[in-house]
Image (cartoon, rainbow, N blue to C red):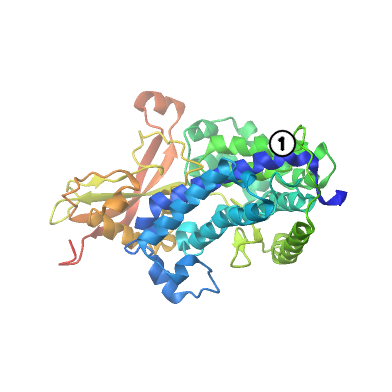
């Protein structure tokens, strides 16, 4: 059936699959290295506490059946191993019927993590990786040319990512319509990167041109994905350039990279595709059945996308098969940061020796220049940005963070850049204060060497200590 496959996309599929495997690898590595203090049995939001109150049907996960920190680590590292094997091309060494379940292994493992991840995993790029990963399992391997229907469903994901983000901006903050949002965004985004300071200081007219170009890329260009070649490839290439621009301007986990991966699947790359037999009937039936299911599940995301009350980053099924996306429907005008400090004094006073904890990615010391971490995701640092917006965003985990800092918990301290206290000398009290941060000017940068200037706003958490007898328990 000539209509079923597209041999011209042989190389596009290969590049897409290897790039997706790389994103999977980063996602599993992030989980393996950070889960214990965040979700472990003694973590801030323990998985066993979550599974005790949420049924399997609402959040399907291997950890609903059994949980231990050792089992979670085994699943995360197994995900790393399978992702690395796929990156190396292991699926090409297997028959088609075995390559499909091999691709479903990282999807099932990561679904298990996301569905118990709670606040730490409540972001659109988690669902985007799962939706893309599930569909990629049916893209085939070297035994068959890429199925047309799967290629178009991948474009359907990319369309919803970009078009949904464009609509949420037009319907949301007025600064998007006035083309002024980038006057603030680079300074107030969740986690700035090493070039964000320079992006912020670009001329105002260029910022306005950037916003206008963003609207074009997200509201017009996605429609061109469904046009004949080479227009579709040009549209995908323009999206890739836009996403790489965003990669340079901040740390957005793997959101930009998974969008680039999706766009790669729409490129018709020049290649001499090998001659392969027609797709087997069972494969055609499976692919068409999956396509029918995904199109059926697209009803709610489409309804949300056209609604005046559009919401961002929502999953409508517990398997995250078809989701709705969007980002930065509103933009903060002022940046606030929660600064966490500790002291060894038994009686805390304002003039006590308060020592500041330094995080890896979030702004702290005004002289500490931001680093590039994405696509690796610093989950605690990202949530600290939300905590600064409102204590309500941190109500379920911030107290657990303070408690573990008071204990000098080794796993929690590994999430930080530096603790001001020796491992065997935990602080007696912890406090948190809210500061307003702004980028320094060019003159201030030359004079002080600091990229940030900060001003004390108010107390966020008064000095707190462990309950009597709690230390060391």
Q: Position of residue 383 (x, y in %)?
A: 43, 54
Q: Position of residue 174 (x, y in %)?
A: 64, 50
Q: Which residue is located at x 33 percent, y 53 percent?
A: 458
Q: Residue furthest right?
A: 2
Q: Position of residue 247 (x, y in %)?
A: 56, 38
The one of 161 and 151 positioned closer to us in this rendering:
151
Image-quadrant location for residue 429: bottom left
The one of 165 and 103 positioned closer to us in this rendering:
103
Image height of 350 relative to 11, above or below: below
Q: Is residue 256 visible?
A: no
Q: Which residue is located at x 48 percent, y 40 percent?
A: 192
Q: Which residue is located at x 48 percent, y 48 percent?
A: 80
Image-quadrant location for residue 249: top right
Image height of 261 relative to 301, above or below: above
The quarter of the rendered structure image containing the C terminus is bottom left
| Residue annotated with mark 1 | 237
């Amino acid at each position: 059936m000539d209509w079923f496959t597209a041999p011209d996309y042989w190389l596009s599929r290969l590049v897409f699959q290897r790039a997706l495997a790389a994103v999977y690898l980063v996602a599993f590595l992030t989980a393996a290295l950070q889960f214990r203090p965040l979700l472990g049995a003694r973590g801030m939001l323990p998985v066993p506490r979550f599974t005790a109150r949420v049924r399997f049907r609402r959040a399907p996960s291997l950890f609903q059946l059994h949980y231990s920190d050792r089992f979670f680590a085994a699943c995360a590292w197994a995900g790393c191993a399978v992702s690395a094997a796929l990156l190396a091309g292991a699926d090409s060494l297997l028959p088609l019927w075995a390559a499909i379940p091999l691709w479903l292994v990282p999807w099932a493992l990561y679904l298990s993590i996301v569905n118990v991840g709670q606040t730490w995993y409540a972001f659109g790029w988690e669902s985007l990786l799962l939706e893309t990963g599930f569909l990629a399992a049916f893209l085939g391997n070297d035994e068959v040319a890429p199925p047309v229907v799967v290629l178009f469903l991948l474009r359907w994901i990319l369309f919803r990512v970009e078009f949904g983000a464009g609509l949420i901006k037009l319907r949301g903050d007025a600064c998007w319509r006035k083309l002024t949002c980038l006057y603030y965004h680079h300074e107030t985004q969740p986690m700035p990167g090493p070039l964000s300071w320079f992006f912020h200081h670009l001329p105002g007219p260029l910022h306005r041109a950037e916003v206008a170009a963003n609207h074009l890329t997200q509201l017009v260009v996605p429609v061109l994905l469904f046009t004949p070649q080479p227009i579709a490839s040009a549209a995908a290439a323009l999206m890739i350039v836009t996403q790489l621009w965003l990669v340079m301007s901040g740390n957005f986990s793997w959101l930009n990279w998974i969008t680039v991966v999706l766009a790669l699947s729409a490129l018709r790359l020049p290649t001499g595709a090998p001659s392969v037999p027609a797709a087997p009937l069972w494969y055609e039936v499976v692919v068409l059945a999956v396509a029918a299911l995904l199109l059926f599940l697209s009803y709610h995301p489409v309804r949300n996308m056209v609604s005046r009350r559009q919401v961002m980053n929502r999953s409508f099924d517990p398997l995250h098969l078809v989701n709705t996306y969007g980002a930065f429907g509103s933009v903060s005008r002022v940046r606030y940061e929660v600064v966490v400090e500790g002291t060894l004094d038994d009686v805390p006073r304002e003039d006590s020796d308060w020592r500041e904890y330094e995080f890896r990615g979030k702004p702290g010391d005004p002289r500490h220049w931001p680093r590039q971490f994405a696509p690796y995701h610093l989950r605690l640092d990202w949530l600290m940005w939300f905590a600064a917006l409102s204590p309500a965003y941190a109500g379920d985990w911030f107290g657990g963070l303070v408690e573990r800092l008071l204990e000098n918990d080794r796993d929690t301290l590994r999430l930080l850049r530096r603790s001001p206290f020796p491992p065997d000398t935990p602080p007696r009290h912890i406090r948190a204060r809210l500061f307003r941060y702004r980028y320094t000017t060019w003159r201030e940068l030359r004079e002080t060497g600091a990229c940030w200037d900060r001003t004390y706003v108010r107390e966020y958490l008064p000095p707190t200590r462990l309950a009597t007898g709690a230390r060391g328990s």
